[in-house]
Amino acid sequence: MPRVSLLIIDDEQPQRENLKGFFVRRHYEVFTADGGTGGIELVRGRRIDIVLTDFKMPDMTGLEVLKRVKEINPEIPIIVMTAFGSIESAVEAMKAGAFDYLQKPVNLDEVELLVKRAAEQWRLISENRELREQLEERFSFSEIVSQSREMEEVLNTAGRVAKTNATVLLRGESGTGKELFARAIHFSSLRKERPFVVVNCAALPETLIESELFGHEKGAFTGADRLRIGRFEEADGGTLFIDEIGDIPAHIQVKLLRVLQSGELQRVGGNETLQVNVRIIAATNRNLEEMMREGSFREDLYYRLNVVTIVIPPLRSRKSDIPLLIDHFLRKHAQRHNAAVKEVSREAVDLLMKYDFPGNVRELEHLIERAVILGHDNLITTDDLPANVRHLRSERNIPREIRTESLNEQLESFEQAIILATLQKTGGNQRQAAKLLGISERNLRYKLGKFKSDKST
């Protein structure tokens, strides 16, 4: 970390030089100015971490210096030095945002202590800013790897809604990246400085969901030996991501609806009504419409959540993203595990393109991480892929050996294998199989009848 830079503004040269020598000996980078005008120019042109300024100077007051510096960089701590008895000036400076004040003549030990405290504040602010920037970069929309048309509209919608306070409902299969989208929306929103809080309803016992969301008072139930702040209170001013919202029991849905409507809640076992300002992003892989018909999900809650719905497509419907994701996860996990793997073979990529990924992007990432960890060379090959992917080589490739049947006989045999495999995939449902194969159901029945006829002869 670079040395702390200190700017001393004072029209009295002996005082200015005395302070400069004192802090130079303590390894600060020190700049000086004989008035507010010169000091402001230094703040504009150099990295200044702390300002120590006199209050009364010919060209401008310390209060004016403070206001001008705050306009340039509001995070710079400013210590104001005032003449003995000018306590009103000090109070005015503190109200305007000064870090602290000193009475002249200054005590060097006292001024050093204040500057150290200001330096510590500056360090914490810098670290928090860097952490925030890292989080924003990590969870920005640019981190969602995609080049497919299927994802273009999804990303555009998410980017537009991020700048608002609208409730968002993310829908999609498990592993499609719903939480990644939720974080990207939050860190691209006006609430990005405030908390992003996650609660996964599917991971909680039904008896704990209410307490997790709304908190509880001490003694509210057996085992509640202290007051517990709920997720809504934790997220106040920020965003609450409720994952697997379809798993919330009906009696808790009523309480959730109240928070969405009025921003009011009560802790379990409490009578006090609390007000919160929270943006809700909910996610589910369940069919909420079907749940409403069954009576297990409230219709009024559904419409409160369904302000903006974003449906994230499964990986199998956006396969053009697979090569990009492979490269992204390869670099990520090679660095994480300090592995020498640099490339995935063309044959392995081809095989992954043929796989349907029931676990979606999450499954692909775990698969690449496994190959990075277990691979022996700097190249991932088909042999490094799990068995459920490797078997596609024999099931989906046309046999290469010379066969005695005619071309028509081989094509019919291959067609039969594809049709039977599709029927097995759909559980014998001919309508679904025909749709997947791109033929009519009538044509499918004809081909099945022909297979049986050929077999009997």
Image: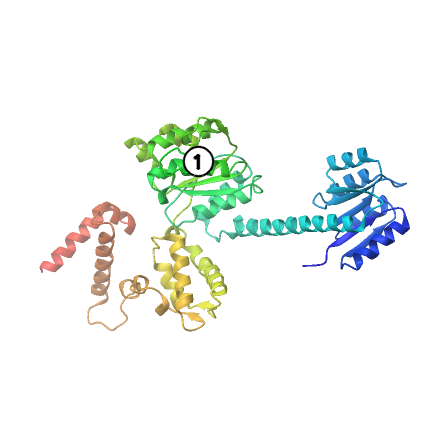
Residue at the image position 80 percent from the left and 58 percent from the top: 24
Instruction: Judge left or right: residue 75 versus residue 346.
Output: right
Image location of residue 324, percent across then percent down: 47, 58
Q: Quadrant of residue 348?
A: bottom left
In the depicted structure, whether residue 63 falls above or below residue 365: above
In the depicted structure, whether residue 260 falls above or below residue 418: above
In the depicted structure, whether residue 156 falls above or below residue 296: below
Instruction: Judge left or right: residue 343 versus residue 15.
Output: left
Image location of residue 373, percent across then percent down: 41, 67
Dot 1: what SS? loop
The residue under label 1 is 215
Image location of residue 397, percent across then percent down: 30, 65
Q: Quadrant of residue 188?
A: top right
Front-most of residues 84 and 257: 84
Residue most extreme to the left: 457
Image location of residue 153, percent across then percent down: 47, 44
Q: Quadrant of residue 31?
A: bottom right
